[in-house]
Amino acid sequence: MNIPEVAAVDTEALRAALDEAGCCVIIDAASPEQMDAIASELGEHVERSSIGASDFEGHETRRLGSPLPRSATFRDLAMHDAVMASGDHVLGHATSWRFSAAEYIEIGPGESAQRLHRDRAKYDRVEFGFEVEMNGMWAITDFTEANGATRVIPASHRFDADRRVSPEETVPAEMTKGSLLLYTGSLYHGGGANQTDSWRKGLSLQHAVGWLTQSTNQFLECPPDEVTDWPDELLRFIGYAKTGNGLGYWRDSEDPLSAVHPDREFARGWATIRPD
């Protein structure tokens, strides 16, 4: 099976692709200029990047975290219509879902292919029986098979837990700068080998149901006193919100957003689901 390509505005096709293939590419979901802006904004922090300490992380791969506070352009794209539609479809069975993490990943020349994996394995390899993550990758530069485009096994979100997979089953998610790969947490995938002399740059995304711990601590990356000018909807999306039935409240049954805006009035109470 090939990776479906859909338009960002075609929500029906997007849902069908995620159901059938477990993945899809949104062609030209953002402009090349937006990708250049993200690269420039995050490039100012490149000296803080970590080089992989294991084969899985990649010894020729640079990883930079905290893109939300470091890139205003990414903040504008964090709640892209395609991301929100995909999350609602894949994770809508939960009371809520939210942003979990993002990472700027630059695969360097000579990097080998990453081991195939399912992102959901981070949760102690628990077999939930349903999707708990909806993730993605922005193409900050063109993704080609030669420069390390993410490799996926379409429809592998349906594989049994004991099903063995091999690189021969994968196809490269080739896409132009500004395109967006979306996939479920159960899909087998991995970074490709970079056989060129240039860096393949991408911005990975993770989203999860609201009752799971976020991959990165958003309240440390985006502390209350540094996000006062961010939109409320974005703050709710990254975790300044109650979730489940009685999770995420702050202090004396307070709305967590009151930590950002102590001068505003918010309803109190820890329950998010109330009986009729």
Image (tube, helix red, strand yellow):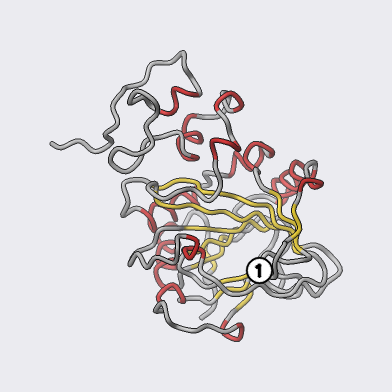
Label 1's element?
A: loop
What residue is disc 1 on?
A: 56
Given residues 28 and 251, the one toward you in this image is 251
Report x, y in % for residue 152.
Answer: 57, 73
Given residues 98 and 122, the one toward you in this image is 122
Instruction: Tell me: 255 left or right of 68.
Output: left
Report x, y in % for residue 252.
Answer: 35, 23
Residue ID at (50%, 76%): 154
10 Å neighbourhood of mark 1: few (<14), some, or many (≥20)? some
Residue ID at (70%, 66%): 54
Report x, y in % for residue 125.
Answer: 44, 67
Given residues 141 and 274, the one toward you in this image is 274
Residue ID at (69%, 62%): 176
In the figure, residue 194 lies in which quadrant? Answer: bottom right
Give the vertical position of 273 relative to 7 (above or below). Answer: above
Residue ID at (44%, 27%): 257
Give the vertical position of 153 relative to 69 (above or below). Answer: below
